[in-house]
């Protein structure tokens, strides 16, 4: 059985993924799914998408997460490189600095990954602190 952890933080992404039966597709192929979202605090949201094999959690980090000064520098330079088509340089920047910087504040992410042990981790917004930290912690 494959364990899939999906971070979804905003309504448009919920619509694009969950309203298109992604959870049903995954669970039909014997996957267990953990959806990390602030929506986990909203009973109607959980009720709408609950099905066997799907769990919800909120790390309560979205409102409090912020980039450090060095993470901000790395992120800004990375965006600049990406806009100019410098994908390889962006990857080197992330691998050399960005990932290590993101790990510094990833305690909640590490705890979730250690307790749930997913096989696959998907973040829907890598330019935001929580997405960066989740992926850095998962690697």
Image: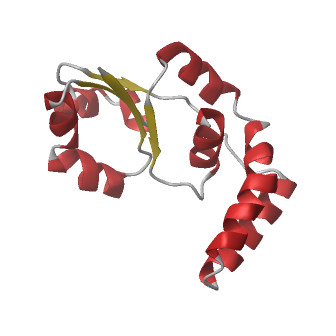
Place of residue 44 in the rendered image (x, y in percent of width and height, measured from the top left): 23, 31
* Residue drawn where x is 44% and y is 28% of the image: 119
Residue positioned 62% across, 19% down in the render: 111
Using the image as rendered, state which of residue 23 and residue 88 is in the foreground.
88
Q: Is residue 26 above or below residue 115?
A: below
Q: Is residue 62 left or right of residue 35?
A: right
Q: If the image is split into quadrants, where does the C terminus sit?
A: top right
Identify which residue is drawn at 15% across, 43% down.
21
Does residue 93 appear in the picture of this structure?
A: yes
Residue displayed at 23% across by 20% down: 53
User: In terms of image quadrants, where is residue 138?
Assistant: top right
Which residue of the protein is positioned furthest toward the top in this rendering? 115
Location of residue 118 in the rendering, given as x and y in whole percent from the top left corner? 45, 25
Viewer-proximal residue among 71 and 138: 138
Percent position (x, y) of residue 2? 33, 25
- Measured along the vertical axis of the image, is residue 33 above or below residue 96? above
Find residue 38 and report its horizontal and vertical position in percent. 44, 36
Q: Can I make out residue 35 in this image? A: no
- Please state, as top left, top right, bottom left or bottom right, where the N terminus lies in the image: top left
Q: How is the image coloured?
A: secondary structure
Is 139 in front, or is 75? 139
Q: Residue furthest right?
A: 70
The residue positioned farthest toward the bottom in the image shown: 84
Q: Nearer the viewer, residue 62 or 31?
A: 31
Count numbered badges in the picture.
0
Residue 78 vertical position relative to residue 95 in the rendered view, above or below: below
Q: Name above or below for residue 85 compared with residue 30.
A: below
Q: Quadrant of residue 77?
A: bottom right
- Direction from residue 72 to residue 7 in the image, left or right: left
* Snapshot quadrant of residue 64: top right
């Amino acid at each position: 059985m494959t364990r899939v952890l999906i971070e979804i933080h905003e309504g448009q992404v919920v619509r694009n993924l969950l309203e298109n039966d992604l959870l049903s597709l995954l669970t039909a192929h014997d996957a267990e799914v953990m959806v990390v979202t602030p929506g986990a605090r909203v009973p109607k949201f959980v009720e709408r998408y609950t099905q066997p094999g799907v769990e919800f959690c909120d790390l309560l980090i979205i409102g409090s997460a912020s980039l450090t000064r060095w993470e901000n520098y790395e992120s800004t330079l990375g965006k600049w490189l990406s806009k100019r088509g410098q994908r390889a340089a962006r990857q080197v920047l992330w691998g050399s600095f960005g990932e290590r910087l993101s790990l510094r504040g990833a305690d909640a992410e590490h705890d979730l990954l250690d307790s749930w042990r997913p096989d696959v981790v998907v973040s829907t917004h890598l330019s935001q602190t929580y997405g960066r930290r989740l992926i850095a912690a998962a690697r």
